Image (cartoon, coloured by chain):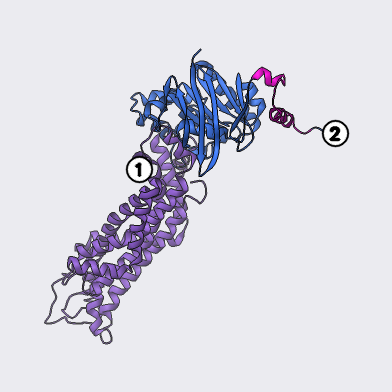
Amino acid sequence: MTAALSVEGLEVVFDRFRALKGVSLEVREGESYGLVGESGSGKSTLLRAITGLAPVSSGTITVNGKTLGKTRDKAFYREVQMVFQDPYGSLHPRQTVDRLLQEPLAIHGIADGEKRIERALDEVGLGNGFRFRYAHQLSGGQRQRVAIARALILEPSILLLDEPTSALDASVQAEVLNLLEEVRRRRKLTFLMVSHDLAIITHMCERLMVMQNGEAVETLTASQLIGHRVSQDYTRNLLRASEGFVRTA
Amino acid sequence: MSAEVVQSRREWLLSERPASRMQARLGRAYVAWRRFSANRLAFIGLLIILALVVVAAFAGVLAPYSPTVGDLKNARLLAPGAAHWFGTDDLGRDIYSRIVYGSRWTLYVVILVAVIAAPIGLLVGTVAGYAGGWTDAILMRITDIFLAFPKLVLALAFVAALGPGIENAVLAIAITSWPPYARIARAETLTVRNSDYIKAVQLMGASPFRIVLRHIMPLCISSLIIRVTLDMAGIILTAAGLGFLGLGAQPPLPEWGAMIASGRRFILDQWWVAAAPGAAILIVSLGFNLLGDGLRDALDPRSGDQ
């Protein structure tokens, strides 16, 4: 299989702070790839660098065989879309769902807008009843569904997920994760998913990379992680932490 | 209209599941209107402004005499009475008629200044705030320079350069009143430019122009409307001030400020000549201020679930 997305020696520097220190990874087509690590380890920065939201100081990013330059063109955004972490902040407060979904279609000059919006809402499990609501009339899970619909409406092949469920409560989390799984299967999408929750990553992803302080610690498959066959101490600590509080007698 | 019809219309407007773009928009407007009309004083302000508009529109019907041609022989400086409700001025003109016609000029000044100054301020502020860097520095330093001059003095300078007249007064006031709007728009822009919903639009591939115009400006507009409404009183007073100094409206235009200026000469003996236009300015300014306060409560994006 070919690589849908590959990153080589990526460096991101914010005002002399090196947020990413030469990170490399390769995501195969149709694969779901996870990024784990503590807060500030650079996982989200990696996603933002790929989309062009964070300044890349060196390294190369290749999407579907095309190496990206300094700026991203419209064609890039039809290939790669992103779902943000906080559904309360990622929807415009003064726009209806309809307006939100229309915007990408208008930008890319796509004609069959009506049909696409209806299809997108159906796909994420929101009926037409939600179409003309404002963000404040939606629950957190519903908002995240709208955000997913917005990302999917351009029919990208790669979806970047920045902790898409960490702001939601447990039952809603499961619903959104199932929705993402289903969408991926149906559309044969490639996922690059950031999470600090190892359970979610092992559930959703085939391979994953552990990050710390802007560096890759190690690359694992999900089964290796489940079987605790890890080589680095940091990963072991992470695993222990994820098991939660253990009462010692 | 029966009570049930009213009830069902209200439900339709407040529906949590609007079925069309129109319904969503109307519902939103209705919520803002309810919040606005719950405020008594703001409602009074709105009534004053509506009355001003009606008077201006029907000045020809409402005014019993000509605003510019007086009866010099018989009607100079008459005290208020049945024939002349607010008395007459030194040229024998009916002051009530002049005030009625003057409302047109007041409205003309206020609307033109708002239409010129608010978009300039909005554009400069949002572009500066969104672009950042050099663009921001240059635009905001220009704004600072304009802000550093006292408004009336700068307006005076412009009128002196352009020549007296109400059009030039409007231009001068507009040129001096946009900087605060630019400041407000920039501040609002800075608070939203790094939000995820703007990032999301960037990730759609939207051009900066589109983002500023369609996503940032709508967020700045309500605070701008509030500010412009509150500034209306100031604009009227500046226009009146220019008129008073003889640099705004020129005789025989019935502009309120100019009317006070001409009444100044006999303010001790014939007080009504200056008092009537003064009261008109006071009432209209008050109306705009009350309206602005009410709009702040109704439109402020930081209040409630707007």
Residue that mark 1 sits on: B213
Q: Nearer the viewer, mark 2 or mark 1?
A: 2
Chain letter, purple: B
**Colour in which chain A is shown?**
blue
Tell me which amino acid carries mark 2: Thr
- Which disc, if any, is residue A248? 2
Q: Chain of mark 1?
A: B
Residue B19 appears at what percent x and percent y? 43, 33
Tell me which amino acid carries mark 1: Leu
Check residue A112 for magenta coloring: no
Q: Is residue B188 left or right of residue B82?
A: right
**Depth check, front residue: B45 or B246:** B246
Please identify the residue farthest to the top as the structure is shown: A1
The dominant secondary structure in magenta is: helix
Residue A157 appears at what percent x and percent y? 46, 21
Please identify the residue farthest to the bottom as the structure is shown: B269
Q: Is residue B172 left or right of residue A79?
A: left
Residue B112 appears at what percent x and percent y? 26, 58
The quadrant holding residue B111 is bottom left
The stretch of residues the image draws in magenta is A221-245
Residue A45 appears at what percent x and percent y? 53, 35
* Element at label 2: loop
- Which disc, if any, is residue B283? none
Residue B256 visible, this orientation: no
Q: Chain of mark 2?
A: A
